Amino acid sequence: MEGFLLNLLECTLTMTVLSCLLLALTPLLERRYSPRCLYALWLVVVVGFAVPVRPGAFPAAVTVALPAPDWEVRLVAPAQQDGGVPAQGQDIAGAQDGGEQALQADARFAFSPVQAAFAVWMLGATAWLAASLAVHVRFVRTVRRWSRPIGEKEPLDALTRAKAHAGVRHRVRLRRCPAVASPMLVGVFRPVILLPYTALTGRALELVLLHELYHLRRGDIPAKMLLMLARAMHWFNPFMRYVARALAYHCEASCDALVVRNTDLDARQYYSETLIGIIRRHSGARSVLCTSYYGGVNGMKRRILSIMDMGTKRIGALAACLTVALTLGMGMALALEPEEETARAALTPMATDAATPVATDAAAPMATQASQEAIPYGVAVSVSGTHGVGTRLCAQPDASLWETPLAVYYDGAPFHAERIYAGQDWAYGSFGNGAVYGYVPLSDLMGATGPRNAQAASLPRGRVTTQAFLLAQARDDAQAIGLLSAGTEVTLWGRVGDWYHVQAGNETGFVLVWSVKVGEAFVASVQKSLPRAFELLLSSEAIRSEETWMFERRAEAWGGDHGVPREGDISAREATDIARRAVAERWGLDEGGLEPAEPDGVYFITVGEDGSYQSRVRNGDEIVTFNRPYYQVNLRYGDDPTQGYSVYIQPVTGEVLAACGPEDGNG
């Protein structure tokens, strides 16, 4: 135990000196030797840290005698009487009468300084290794849940060409994952190349895959495993972070050199631009056992300069041999030996009425988990709520915002997860291809590996009650992407304030809540779960404001005799109710079965205001001429499109001016 600790201390001191020397000479070595040579040199250094034993055939040049500890800690159990009570006044002098045997008989635990030091080292190494493995396990779980296999022909063909160019015969899987920010290689026995959701195509994709395949061919993942072991062994050495950084940089630079080998300046520039475009966002999930490395602005600058350097570099066999010799030689140059033990006194607690135990607390290092992000255009998942019906889209990953969300979405609604905050159990993304962005609890999403909860329920459906525009955003001034006729069936994804996020055919957008009729079951279940911030006030002012906006849009789009109701006119909803009553009375129909017709709805016609145009319509057996503005309400009865009815209404008084049905040729 003592010999191991001394060898470890010798190793960390000598290899730190060698690493400092290598770091100081790096600018000079980069001008003379290839990146592959420098990577090999740092691999030798890592092996030197990981193997603390050196051959000792020759005497050490420098011998440092460490003072031997002259004490040890013993916890002695006090002597007891027959009844189990400690004897009064019994001390160490009494034990001396029995000699050394009495002392050994009373001793229960003994900790030497060497044992204490070994325990501290073991605790630190175990904690560091456990923290690193925990981060890796969390990373692997995130990748397994959110990654998707790539089945497109273009990336698979690019992988085949890259494998042939790199000379790789292993089976390599290709997956796309929103939790990674740059391409990386993961796995030793079943290697996988993870690609982010960036637009990598053509030559750029092939170069990126070639870079990762060179990592696989050279065995860089096992090298990183060796580095992780060395860092765990030397957890107390703060210089190990610089060793890890240097090895990671030269690992990437050497792969870059293999990719651009025997290429011209234009090809090197294209590869550099590809790297810059990929690593522009570098805050995604990582693991110590993957090939993702950024290195900051300075690191990228050095990589680009190395890629663009077309000068001839040496292989550096002599430099590698020299590094190996220094690694072995510096271990033999320093020897740490303890002095001969001069005295050792046994420290025992003074005899008292009762023994007082002494406890020591050791604070173990804590592993930190960075927030995992992914770049836009993430993976598509579905809502499967565990906090109620559906889920709520919040402005921040904060549970205190649950009662004041941005939107409410129902079970089964598709969500594009772009960034994953696994440590906080939140996902950032959007509904409707970027229409509404926010944060959703991960527990309310149904991921790639199957539903975490019950199977998502069927999305609710509704019917448009009056002709309405389908908007790209949930606001009045948004761009119109379609026109929904009265009676159109829509699928409800969710609700954003006073707007429904709906799907109508192949189009998705937003319509106002009061223009969609939903079933009673939907109202009883989903609507009751809405937060108070989503209470809908169907005031007459709100209804008239929406109708005015709809007529203005229709007049802008169609022009001609289409206009906007004036102040003092009845509302379009009132005109529709009047038309329903008139048709039901005249044709003997059930008023509840009459709905605004498809494709027509409610129109405000402005003919005759300037005397230049008049409208003529059929009213039974007669022809009626209008020279004043009027409402035209088109209704249908049931699902038969031939059962059409048109009613013409005076906009101020609500008087029915004319009405015609299927027998009048209106069907």
Image (tube, rainbow, N blue to C red):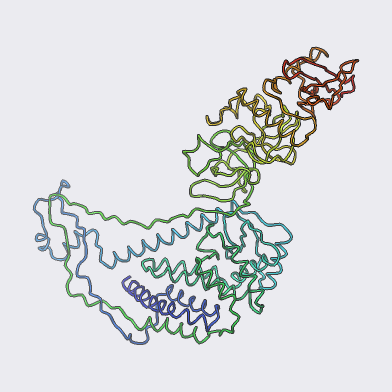
Q: Nearer the viewer, residue 299 or 119?
A: 299
Q: Residue at x 55, y 80 (%)?
A: 34
| Image quarter (top left, top right, bottom left or bottom right) of the C terminus | top right
**Is 292 drawn above or below residue 573 in the view shown?**
below
| Image quarter (top left, top right, bottom left or bottom right) of the N terminus | bottom left
Q: Nearer the viewer, residue 213 or 617?
A: 617
Residue 190 is at least partly visible in this image: no
Residue 10 falls left or right of residue 540? left
Residue 276 is at least partly visible in this image: yes
Q: Picture quarter containing residue 199?
A: bottom right
Residue 510, x across and y down, in percent: 66, 37
Residue 177, x across and y down, in percent: 61, 55
Residue 464, x across and y down, in percent: 72, 29
Residue 14, x across and y down, in percent: 37, 78
Residue 130 falls left or right of residue 584? left
Count of picture labels = 0
Residue 112 falls left or right of residue 489? left
Q: Nearer the viewer, residue 532 or 559?
A: 559
**Is 89 drawn above or below residue 101 in the view shown?**
above
Q: Nearer the viewer, residue 450 or 182?
A: 182
Q: Picture quarter containing residue 431?
A: top right
Residue 468 falls left or right of residue 354? right
